[in-house]
Amino acid sequence: MGVAKKSIEEIVQAIGGKENINKASHCVTRLRFSLKDESVVDTETLEEVDLVKGSFSANGQYQVIIGQGTVDKAYKVLLEVTGLQESSKAEVKDEANEKLNPFQKLVKLLGDIFIPILPAIVTAGLLLGLNNILIGEGVFYDGKSVIDVHTQWKGFSEIVNLIANTAFTFLPGLIGWSAVKRFGGSPLLGIVLGLMLIHPNLMNANEALQQDVLPQWDLFGLGVNQIGYQGQVLPVLFAAWLLAFLEKWLRKIVPDSIQLLVVAPVALLVTGFAAFIFIGPVMLTVGTAVTDGVMAIFGNLGGAAGFIYAGINSLLVVTGMHHPFIALDLQLIAAVGMTYLWPVRVMSNIAQGSAALAMMFVTKKKTLKGTALTSSISAFLGVTEPAMFGINIRFKFPFVFAMIGAAFAGMIVAMNNVEGTIGIGGLPAFLNISPNFWSVYFLATVMAIVIPFILTLVYAKVKHKDL
């Protein structure tokens, strides 16, 4: 199906005309604009355009949700209508970054580092969930696991566990690659840096914290602990920044003819010494303090912590501030083998999907029904963007009721100290939850579905009969 030129013209007019557009690009579902002045955007008129499924501003970009497949055609027509040159997402992001304040830039930086490695982490989480089903006692057999009853599955389980644990075991390597790339250095050096920090000759950092005496290098009279940073996040992040900084600086001052012999060796050597002498020990202390703090919060204020975190998670997503919590999840998993945050966060996915689904039953508009149904399914599978921006934020009250439902569901999850790993969101997320917590987790899931659905349905029937 083609895209009507009139629809694109209406979009352009609603966002302030072509003179208000600096650059435009698109992703899988959205048109992305870097605008001169977002205050002139007529959101109400924009979202009445038949092609538009929602809109929002995030990280200095104004984004208009069109839909997968259709957005490619819409972008081509947009270039024709406006006379703009085709821009990449990176170009639009770079221009949009200039509008961000320092805190927003930090949040975006963390997102740029951790989002590229999420596929590996999510895959690892799903496989760990599969293995949990195989080794969890009482899942299918009273007091026994699947591999206890069916011993022929033991080898299969061990291989699955090895594959699943690889991403977490070599996490510094993944972060090193992504971070150095984001900071403008060579990704390959980032991988080497990350693997260097978990070299098998080094004592595991978690084991080191339990020891009174540590193996050391004698560096001209200075004792340097031979500690690795397996699964740690902060040491490799800061070391990656230093490595990229040194590499870029050296490339400016070292003649081209000898750069291959000088730049990488010197940058890696200096960063390695700095990492083991200063960066690693300091950041390990900071990371340990953060882990202990989160554990204490959920240990002493579990219900309140879960209520607040699940309740505001949708707001964090809207502002892009949810990305730092990925690093926190990874830090917890590395330190204690699980996270309390992910199981709580998933309640927000489910609640947003439920509120959008309720809107499908409320509205009489055929287009809105279709959008509500498809976006709710997407949210139930862990992708909340279409539901939030296409339906719930657009009408406001479904978004609020989803936050309320998520808060109460998150409270139940946190009160019972439900443990899990990072993985897929939405309804399939139970695969990432330890099986011995499934009963209470499923109860919370039901709450995350029922509360937003009923509140949205009743409120819409009473207050918005014209929908």
Image (cartoon, helix red, strand yellow):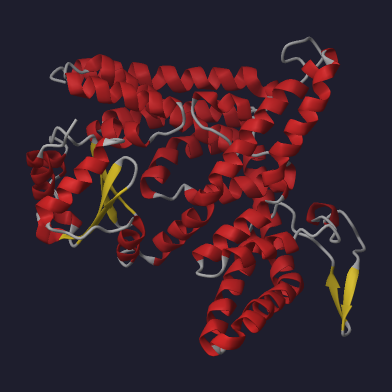
In the depicted structure, whether residue 97 falls above or below residue 79: below
Q: Residue at x 41, y 20 (%)?
A: 451
Q: Residue at x 68, y 32 (%)?
A: 128
For residue 277, side relative to residue 99 (left or right): right
Residue 230 quadrant: bottom right
Residue 398 position in % (x across, y down)? 30, 27
Q: Residue at x 46, y 31 (%)?
A: 382
For residue 259, side relative to residue 208 (left or right): left
Q: How many marks?
A: 0
In the depicted structure, whether residue 199 falls above or below residue 305: below
Residue 127 quadrant: top right
Q: Residue at x 13, y 34 (%)?
A: 48
Quadrant where the image shows the C terminus = top left
Residue 345 position in % (x across, y down)? 51, 35
| Camera sees residue 406 | no
Residue 156 position in % (x across, y down)? 77, 26
Residue 134 position in % (x across, y down)? 74, 21
Q: Residue furthest front?
A: 257
**305 vs 18, nearest the viewer:** 18
**49 vs 446, nearest the viewer:** 49
**351 vs 63, nearest the viewer:** 63
Residue 197 quadrant: bottom right
For residue 225, side relative to residue 384 (left or right): right
